[in-house]
Amino acid sequence: MSGAARSAGWALLPLLTATVTTTMANTVVNVPMTAILGELGAPLSRGVLVATAFTVTLAALMPLSGWIGDRLGRRRVLCGAMVCMIVGSVGAATAHGLGQLVAFRMLQGLAAAPVTPVVMVLVVQVLGPQRRGRAMSLWAAANGAGQALGPTTGGLLAAALGWRAVFWQIVPLSLLVLAGSRLLPADRTSGRATDGATDRTTGRTPGQAVDPARGLPRLDWRGALLLTVGAALLMAATSAVPTLGVGSPAVWVGAALGVAGLVAFVAVERGRADAFLHPRQLVEVRYVRSSFGVFAQMFVLGATLLAVPVYLVRTHGMSTGGTGLAMLALPLTMAVLAPVAGRTTERFGGRTVMRCGLLALLSGTGLLAAMTGVRGGLPPLVGALLLTGVGIAFVQTPAATGASRSTAGRTGAGLGVFNLIRFCAMALGSACVALLGTRPEQLVVVFTVCAAVALASYAFTYVGTDPVDPPPAGHDHARPAARRGAAPGRGGLATRATGLRPAGSVPSGAPGGSR
């Protein structure tokens, strides 16, 4: 192994550890929730606050925190996030009331918000743009590992040491990230925008207002505030459906205000040279296609993680521990197959791999619908979970790869919106279960809806053509244009929509590579 490869391997450790840490922090409360509420003297109906305080804060702040990472430096922001995560975890572990716990869970969500967009950029920077698919697969594997470890360690630690231990475990992981941050690429917080594209280093686009003292883009507070508040209201309303019910006025008012905020964001930002995030970048066909794919994947994941445990406990009388072990089949499959998905994405192209993943997702949800309809036992249900995990693995990696290659994905704010869509879709999947019910015959409808979402996303993979990216510097063996889904000399719909040139549009140091 060369010195450069060895250095890159070490640099990946803090990035992947940060991803595992924040994913675990999100899910560690799921299993010990009853014990937490019992000791704090809170009713079970308030348990949703402990979970959603983290998720809503995380999702709503992702675009803004991604912009801050571009502005202040990604390594610096990652270190600050880990410090906040330590404070939030210590506060949650020592909380004496539900209000304190919810507040520190919000701080944990704030700390987790910049991690995903920062890590998605840095893993590509560390491995090189020619291995973008592999880089995204490592990020996806870390996500799967965190989703598997969170509920498992939460249940084991709560049983052995009490529920407060589930928060203490986050502290040493965060310290490991801080210690390893010295291995990451140095921050560069100044630079010049590349012709016709967003500067990957500063997040600046041509014509955008800059701070004259530092040459960095100024924050468009109107756009950032509208997007953040709109997303927060929509996420909160969606997350409240399982508790308040779909007919609750609070749900409908929150959702309406959230949609109004997002519509206002588009209206305010449209045509502005100094926009927080240009709306036209969000409709680039490659970005939209990736967003559709990840929406389907996370919608299915959110519905499955809520519906299947209820089915196993109520219909088959399984214990909580046994149910947790059965559910491990899903995230472990995601984690194990993510590197395979990365290599196949680089070899065959993201769109082809995503189609295969969506077909597997469609088959898995169809099998889940059939199994719940006939009250199938554990072995066939685990088989359906494995097939669903295969689908998720082969959708998540190419979707993230495609998003990071798009114009919007060259900024932290754009990657933040992409991940905001991920979490909104997961909340909608959970809300779908709450709306349609958890009896076996109702779960048939739930998984049929999941299959329909996967089918719609599969159909959308045939829409549009991608711009032809130039080969990464120093590489002369790029695939022919015909294999990239566009004819030579044509930029496709995305090029015409964004005004970017097919050649020379990727700034120096920006991730390139496969879809």
Image (cartoon, helix red, strand yellow):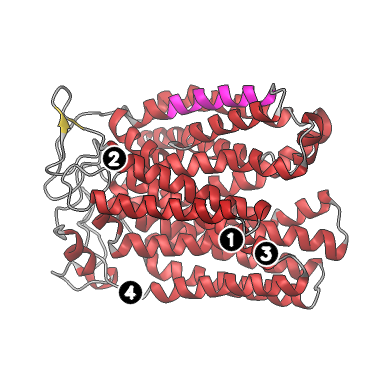
| Contact, mark 1 vs mark 4 (Cβ under 8 Å) | no
In this rendering, position of residue 280 left or right of residue 383:
left
For disc 3, the marked residue is 385
Badge 4 density bin: few <14, some 14–19, many ≥20, Cα 10 Å: few
> Which amino acid type is shown beneath numbered disc 4?
Val
Dot 1: element: helix
- The tag earlier along the polypeptide, 1 or 3, is 3
Question: Which residue shows up at 14% across the image and 36% down it?
Answer: 192
Q: Nearer the viewer, mark 1 or mark 4?
A: 1
Dot 2: element: helix
Badge 1 density bin: few <14, some 14–19, many ≥20, Cα 10 Å: many
Please tell me whether residue 220 is drawn above or below residue 336 in the rendered image.
Answer: above
Which quadrant does the N terminus fall into? Answer: top left
Which residue is most to the front?
A: 249
Residue 88 lies in the magenta stretch: yes
For disc 1, the marked residue is 429
- The tag earlier along the polypeptide, 2 or 4, is 2
- Quadrant hosting residue 184: top left
> Which amino acid type is shown beneath numbered disc 2?
Arg
Dot 4: element: loop
Badge 3 density bin: few <14, some 14–19, many ≥20, Cα 10 Å: many
Q: Nearer the viewer, mark 2 or mark 4?
A: 2
Q: Main secondary structure of the magenta part?
A: helix
| Residue 222 - label | 2
Q: Nearer the viewer, mark 1 or mark 3?
A: 1
> Residues in magenta?
78-93
- The tag earlier along the polypeptide, 1 or 4, is 1
Q: Nearer the viewer, mark 2 or mark 3?
A: 2
Question: Which residue shows up at 26% across the image and 29% down it?
Answer: 188
| Contact, mark 2 vs mark 4 (Cβ under 8 Å) | no
Q: Nearer the viewer, residue 494 or 508?
A: 494
